[in-house]
Structures are given as C-alpha cells and as structure tokens.
Image (cartoon, rainbow, N blue to C red):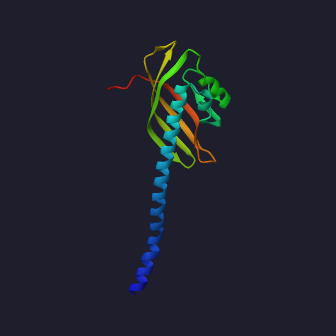
Amino acid sequence: MKARTYVTLLAASLPLISTAGAQATKSSSYAADIAAIGKVAAEFSQRYMRGDAQGMADLYTENGAIFPSGRPIIKGKADIKAYWTLPPNVKVVDHKTTADSVIVVGNTAYDYGTFRAQNSRDGQTANPGYGKYVIVWQRQNDGRWLMHLDIWNNSPAPQP
C-alpha cells in the first residue's frame, strides 16, 4: 500500500517538477531578453551621440516605424535613417533612456520609460530635454531584438 501511495504522489508531482524547471528556464530567459533589449537601447544612444544615422536605422525592423512628436509616422529603415540624420552643425552630446518597465511576451517586448537628451548647435550646448517613450520590440530569427514601433514625446524635467 505504501509503495502505491509513493508512486501516486510521484506521478502527481511530475507536472509540478516540470513546471518549476520551465519557470526557472523562463525566468533566466526573460532576464536575458530584458538585458539584451537594454544593451540595444544603450547602443542606440551611443550611435545617436556619434551621429551614426545608418547605425541607428539598423536597430529597427525592416518595416519599423517611428512616431516623432508633432510629425507624421515615419516607416522603413531608409526614412528612419533620414529622420535621424543630423545637420552638420548639430551634435548630440548626451542621450540616455531609462526603462520603467519591459514586458516580454514571446517574440515581442513592450518597453516604456523616460529619456534625457542634450545637443549642441555650432558648439553651443543647449539645455537638456526630457521625455517619455514606448517601444515595441521584436525578436528576429537570429535572436536579436530590434525596435519595431518607437514613439516619444517631451515632458518636464524630473523632480529631484
């Protein structure tokens, strides 16, 4: 009788053991996805500060779209590159995004947060600007995360 109870308990617990293993794998995979997205976001800022519009456009999906404040939607890498191309007398001296939340669901991730940006024009540094953003990311077949939809607008400076 005891052997039968043990087999029944073992059989009943197998789905729980399997689920726990899947949860641990999911958690480490989830953390890795969030870290990978953060790395791409940081690379975007670095490319922006270098004035690398092509490099920035390469961080979007082929049919990606950006939604700049007060402008029409801009679709596709070529038009995204044109948008991010700075005039010769303008340089971005600071750009940083801070994610408030990143939610990964399969091959899509939803990221929102705030940003700070500062540029110089003809060598004169402007006051920093602040804003908020939402990015929808898509995992590519090769595993890379790229921005698919990117919307932002200005907001007041954060309170100390």
Is 89 placed left or right of 11 in the picture? right
Q: Is residue 106 above or below residue 18?
A: above
Q: Residue at x 50, y 25 (%)?
A: 153
Instruction: For residue 83, say whether it is visible.
Output: yes
- Position in image of residue 142 (x %, y %): 62, 48
Q: Is residue 76 visible?
A: no
Please name whichever residue, 118 or 157, is drawn nearer the observer in this view of the structure: 118
Q: Residue furthest bottom?
A: 1
Along the line of sight, which residue is nearer the eye, 34 or 13? 34
- Vertical placement of residue 69 versus 102, above or below: above
Instruction: Please state if 59 lies on the left or on the right of 119 as rendered.
Output: right
**Placement of the N terminus among the 4 image quadrants:** bottom left
Query: Exactly how many numbered labels are in the figure?
Result: 0
| Residue located 51% across and 47% down the image | 33
Task: Tell which of 104 and 93 is nearer to you.
Answer: 93
Image-quadrant location for residue 69: top right
Instruction: Work out whether 43 lies above or below 18.
Output: above
Residue 149: where, in percent of width, then height? 58, 34
> Where, quadrant-wise, is the C terminus in this rendering?
top left
Q: Position of residue 84 (x, y in %)?
A: 59, 24
Q: Judge whether 154 appears above or below 104 on screen.
A: above
In which quadrant of the rendered view does residue 6 lie?
bottom left
Residue 105, horizontal then vertical, whole percent: 53, 48
Q: Quadrant of residue 155?
A: top left
